[in-house]
Amino acid sequence: MTTPDRPSRLPSLTGLRFPAALLVFVYHASLQLPSTSLFADQGLAGGFATAGAQLGALGVTFFFVLSGFVLTWSAREHDTPRAFWRRRLVKIYPNYVVAWILAMVVFAAAYTPAWQAVLNLFMLQVWVPDFFVNISVNPPSWSLGTEAIFYAAFPLLLVLANRIREDRLKYWIAGTVAGVVATPLVAYLVFPSTPGVPGGWEASESQYWFAYFLPPVRLLDFALGILVARAVLSGRWRDVGLGWSALLLAVAVPLASFVPYLYGQRAVTIVPIVLLIAAAATADAQGRFTPFRGRAARWLGEISFAFYLLHFIVLAAGRSLLGRTFGTPAAIALLAAELAVSIALAALLYTAVERPITRRFSTARRAAVVPQQRQPALTVEHSGGPSR
């Protein structure tokens, strides 16, 4: 196999970020919560919730794998951990704080204990084995607490990954996939089956925390992205193409609803996610067309981190302002309006906060004066979430 060229940007992976964030939006919109649901027809609302039950987990897992992949792809030989951590901090944390403030003002301050609010502000909520702590303040923000651990570990993980012989990468990738698939089995076998997660999911709070929230466990997703990026860059990856990857993922998504809940969150979709990311990167490296390279797709991808952080706040604020549920046509129209508002606010946050702060503070002043002594900021880094 030939080693692909290494372009500084991967536009198709940027373009894929918004569909992943949109899956998380649909998941949260589908939840039968009095604070967000707009559908008066309970039968339809229940069907919507069933259809969307695993979409949020799919989007978050995609972002975790994507983070490891693009950070490895864009890594430069003379970069330093300190410079890397600085770029990550100035890109992630300002948006995170703005979303934290908005969530507190709009709804969370009314019922969030001060200690939980502080945990959230410092991205520590995922370390507490309590479901309501994990999703407190702004529920999607838990994934940023997990990604913070990824970023802290990345310089070391990259060094370790680079020591793996190229012909052994396939075994490390297979082993990491096996670890992801084994995670729900460990959760079901080791942790007690009660009390159950609110909402009737087939898992206890401790099982769900271990398999879904806990950063060291989710580090497997991130590490898988690192290993696959190394395989693609070294020419050791067998690309199945974007079309086949998308088809496999389309088959895996409904299948996730027919297996035990924790298996459906990651185990069923992890291989198609990896194949899709690698196929999109390979297509970009070879200059081939993909539907995710267009200007609109790339713009939506650029604002996807802000969208991910703000969309639940819009859903909750919209339901609070409207004050009631609606018939199906009106509910669909209102949900589309909430999506549009989320995109508009995300564009504002990206333009007013994320982009200017990143440009101004991602590189130290002395690096700007003597640029040859420090590598430039990574150009294709993924910004988060379930986040991303």
Image (cartoon, rainbow, N blue to C red):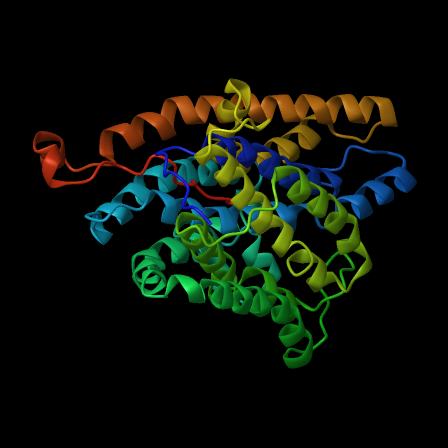
Q: Could you tell me residue 299's position as x and y percent? A: 49, 23
Q: Is residue 14 above or below residue 152?
A: above
Residue that extends furthest to the front in the rendered view of this protein: 1
> Seen in the image, is 194 located left or right of residue 376?
right
Q: Could you tell me residue 50's position as x and y percent? A: 81, 48
Q: Residue at point 77% right, 65% down?
A: 260
Q: Could you tell me residue 126's position as x and y percent? A: 50, 59
> Seen in the image, is 300 located left or right of residue 338?
left
Residue that extends furthest to the bottom in the rendered view of this protein: 190
Q: Is residue 372 among what the camera can see?
A: yes
Residue 110 position by quadrant? top right
Q: Residue at point 61% right, 61% down?
A: 131
> Seen in the image, is 297 located left or right of residue 254?
left
Q: Residue at point 56% right, 32% down?
A: 18
Q: Nearer the viewer, residue 34 or 77?
A: 77
Q: Residue at point 41% right, 36% down?
A: 95
Q: Could you tell me residue 254's position as x and y percent? A: 79, 49
Q: Nearer the viewer, residue 307 or 114?
A: 307
Q: Is residue 120 among what the camera can see?
A: no
Q: Nearer the viewer, residue 71 or 5?
A: 5
